[in-house]
Amino acid sequence: MNICFLDLDGVLNSQIYYMSDRFKKGDSNSMLEYHLNQIDPVAIGFLNEFVEETDCKIVLSSTWRHTAFEDRVLYHAGFKGDVIDVTPSLRGTGIVRGNEILRWIQDNKELLGYYHSDYKSYVIFDDDSDMLLWQKDNFFQTDPYSGLTFNTTYRATRFLETIKNRE
């Protein structure tokens, strides 16, 4: 099973989006509307193409996973894939997002069919670099200025194809 650990801010929105005509400035009538306006439809399009080509399932690693809107916002924004879970929230000195991803992989070895150190069929889309060193090959960092791009999803797709061909 291919998994995509997905951050939202800096990935599905960006400075370019906030400066574009696609971003609606002003008050929203509801919290869902407000959160929906934070998602760039162009980035959703790139994510949809990536998920369709790789058959990735989404696990949210974003701080948005703590809101009531987590996956509903994605579906309302036009996301066509499957959000299957969220990473756990770990707190403490030296804990980074990479630790939360590792814990999710460890806790879901039956679903994945692998022990965590053998599982390689995943990618991480995030604009922050707070991952573990051994996750570097699976990590596809986005630029918060431009967010998720075709180039990023293309490289991630090729990476997953390479992993599949090795197995």
Image: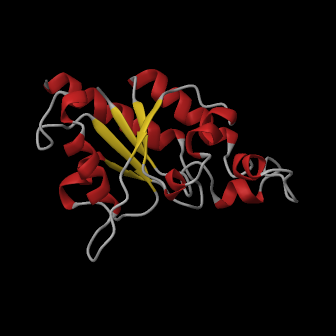
Residue 8: x %, y % from top left: 54, 51
Residue at horizontal 55 percent and vertical 61 percent from the top:
144
| Front residue of this view, candidates 165 and 132 | 132
> Along the horizontal axis of the image, is 89 left or right of 34?
left
Residue at horizontal 27 percent and vertical 77 percent from the top:
93
Residue 4: x %, y % from top left: 39, 38
Rendered view: 77 above or below 28: above
The residue positioned farthest toward the front in the image shown: 68
| Front residue of this view, candidates 19 and 80 | 80
The residue positioned farthest toward the bottom in the image shown: 93
> Along the horizontal axis of the image, is 144 left or right of 125?
right
Residue at horizontal 73 percent and vertical 47 percent from the top:
32
Quarter of the image for the N terminus: give it. top left
Residue 69: x %, y % from top left: 62, 46
| Front residue of this view, candidates 153 and 86 | 86
Q: Quadrant of residue 16?
A: bottom right
Q: Indicate how the structure is coloured in the image.
A: secondary structure
Q: Quadrant of residue 72?
A: top right
Residue 154: x %, y % from top left: 43, 35
> Along the horizontal axis of the image, is 120 left or right of 65?
left
Rendered view: 39 above or below 119: below
Quarter of the image for the C terminus: give it. top left
Instruction: State the count of labels.
Output: 0
